[in-house]
Image: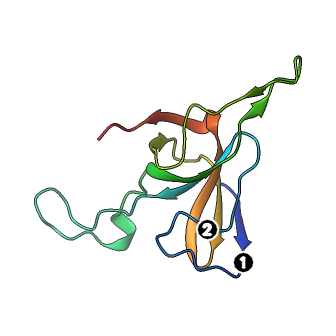
Amino acid sequence: MGKTAEASNGTKAGKSANVGFRPLGDKVLVRRDKAGDRTESGLYLPEKAKETPRIGTIVAAGTGRTNHKTGDLIPLSISKGDRVLFSSYSGTEVKIDGEEYLVMTEGEILAIVQD
């Protein structure tokens, strides 16, 4: 995976979208989905056999990137609350108030998942 960083603030993240963390530019903060603990046939998987999910929910998003030629802001095509698919080694892992997240650029996101 990517690098790991520790972040700490005085707020309680819990399942709230307000984590006291604001990504800059075209960066987003993603909460990875939990790994399944059973196979489709109902067998329990040991911890080592679980596949790391590549789908998550955007918890916070930056404002977009700047066009360096014109200085205009190019807004993100994704937003807070979107479920997204990303590659296995995308992003940088951060831990905020004991919960793990990924910080990645919009370019590392492959698709928006439609449920």
Residue 71: x, y in percent? 87, 24
The reply, left or right, for residue 76 in relation to residue 78 is: right
- Quarter of the rendering containing residue 106: top right
Image vertical order of residue 108 relative to residue 90, above or below: above
For badge 1, the amino acid type reads Asn
Q: Kindly state the secondary structure of the residue where label 1 is placed.
A: loop
For badge 2, the amino acid type reads Val
Any mark on residue 83, and which?
Answer: none
> Residue lying furthest top in this view?
69
Residue 75: x, y in percent? 67, 31
Q: Earlier in the sequence, mark 1 or mark 2?
A: 1
Question: Pointer 1 and pointer 2: residues touching (CB < 8 Å)?
Answer: yes
The colour scheme applied to this rendered structure is rainbow
Q: Kindly state the secondary structure of the residue where label 2 is placed.
A: loop
> Residue lying furthest left in this view?
41
Residue 50: x, y in percent? 35, 63
Any mark on residue 19, and which?
Answer: 2
Quadrant of the frame with the C terminus: top left
How many angstroms separate mark 1 from mark 2 (CA)?
9 Å
